[in-house]
Image: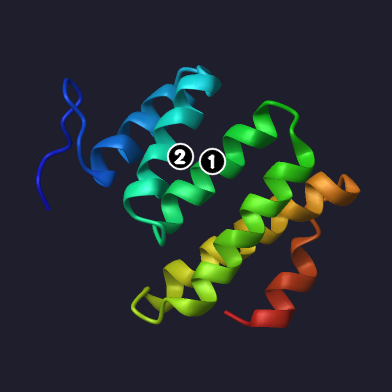
Amino acid sequence: MSEPNNDNPQSAADFLRLGWVFHGKSNESIAEENFLKAISLSPALIDAYYGLGLVLKAQGRRQEAVKTFGEVVSLLDKDISIDRTRRAVLRRLTHGHINLLQSGDWGLEKEIWKHGS
């Protein structure tokens, strides 16, 4: 994969990286723009949806965040090329965010037992 271009982003990878950079700086509106651009270029880019979910959560846009995290779970179910361990960890984290947004509790115990190791 090519090195992400920060000066003239063109690829989904470029925009994904910029999304993470701006989210890390708590510049959520610019992070959101970059994650959305990454998704527009690569609609199955799970990491972009996950990042977007975190941004929406940070902005207090709970319902949109839940919907976006739901898309992460849907994409995880569709993409069989993802490493089993990465899939399990990402699924648990995603469900944890959904649970936290909906009930105020991560509720990961049931996810761990539900999906196994």
Mark 1 or mark 2: name the one nearer the start of the chain. Answer: 2
Q: Which residue is mark 1?
A: 52
In this rendered view, identify the residue nearer to me: 22 or 71: 71
In this rendered view, identify the residue nearer to me: 88 or 78: 78
Instruction: Kindly check if marks 1 and 2 are in contact, taking CB atoms under 8 A apart as contact.
Output: yes
- Whole-percent x, y for residue 32 in the image: 50, 31
Quadrant in the picture for residue 16:
top left
54 to the left or right of 49: right
* Residue in the picture at 48% in, 78% down: 78
- Whole-percent x, y for residue 19 in the image: 40, 32
Q: In the rendered structure, which amino acid carries the disc numbered 1?
A: Leu
2 to the left or right of 24: left
Q: Which residue is mark 2?
A: 36
Q: In the rendered structure, which amino acid carries the disc numbered 2?
A: Leu
* Residue in the picture at 86% in, 50% down: 102
Q: Secondary structure at mark 2?
A: helix
Question: How many numbered marks are there?
Answer: 2
Badge 1, how many Cα within 10 Å: few under 14, some, many 20+? Answer: many
55 to the left or right of 61: left
Q: Is residue 103 above or below residue 75?
A: above
* Residue in the picture at 61% in, 56% down: 93
